[in-house]
Amino acid sequence: RRLTSRGTTGPVMFAKIVKPGGEQPDELEKSIGEALLELEVNSDLKVQLRELYLTGAKELDIGDKKKCVIIFVPVPLLRQFQKIQVRLVRELEKKFSGKHVVIVAQRRIVTKPTRKTRNQKQMRPRSRTLTAVHDAILEDLCFPSEIVGKRIRVKLDSSRLIKIVLEKAQQTNVEHKLDTFAAVYKKLTG
């Protein structure tokens, strides 16, 4: 069920936020929804933003008194968001007074099949495994830059250090956000 500005299920502000389970959006999500609606009305992104909505948002402290806004979008809409992501993020960062904004797809991890759950009708798809979801989150964070290299170093205390090499072409766009990417990835993947 999708909320629209014409629907009677809520005010216009909620048109850009569709929460799973029909929950009410919090203040941050409402403000992002309002910003998206405002951009849709006032900017050249109108056509692209018309069909897009988000499923949630979080604010995260990065350190050095900096904050970051994580916007969660449905996986099927991720490609459309990524087409306009550079301009959209720039506009949202202006609106939220210099806070970094990252867009991540809302993915689901399905638990590993055990003896009790073996007799399920469907196999777990590869895209729902823990590793696949974590890799996809990392790719979403680094967009528009692509990951060209990856090293995983497992220390003696079984903690992992993941080193990512991003493409040189997008260095100027991404370089100042590297700490944000690290903090958000750590927060989302644990």
Image: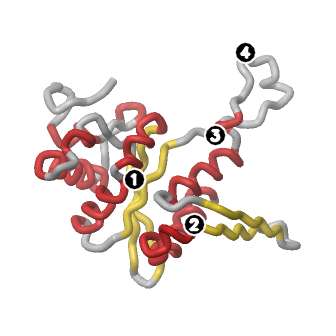
If you read the primary sequence from the N terminus, does the residue marked by circle 1 or circle 2 appear first?
1
Disc 4 element: loop
Question: Could you tell me how far apart the alpha carbons at marks 4 and 2 are, in whole angstroms?
Answer: 42 Å
Residue 83 against residue 20 in the figure, above or below? below
Q: Position of residue 106 (x, y in %)?
A: 49, 43
Q: Tell me the CA gap for discs 1 and 3.
A: 18 Å
Q: Nearer the viewer, residue 65 or 37?
A: 37
Which residue has dot 3 on it?
109
Residue denoted by label 1: 71
Alpha-carbon distance for marks 1 and 2?
A: 24 Å
Per the rendering, the mark at residue 167 is 2
At mark 1, the secondary structure is strand
**Dot 3: within a 10 Å radius of its alpha carbon, few (fewer than 14), some, or many (20 or more) residues?**
some
Residue contact at pointers 4 and 3, CB within 8 angstroms: no
Q: Is residue 171 left or right of residue 155?
A: left
Mark nearest the camera among 3 and 2 is 2
Residue 152 position by quadrant: bottom right
The residue at the point 84 percent across, 72 percent down is 155
What residue type is disc 1 on? Ile
Label 1 vs 3, first from the N-terminus: 1
Which comes sooner in the sequence, label 4 or label 2? 4
* Residue at 82% in and 31% down: 114
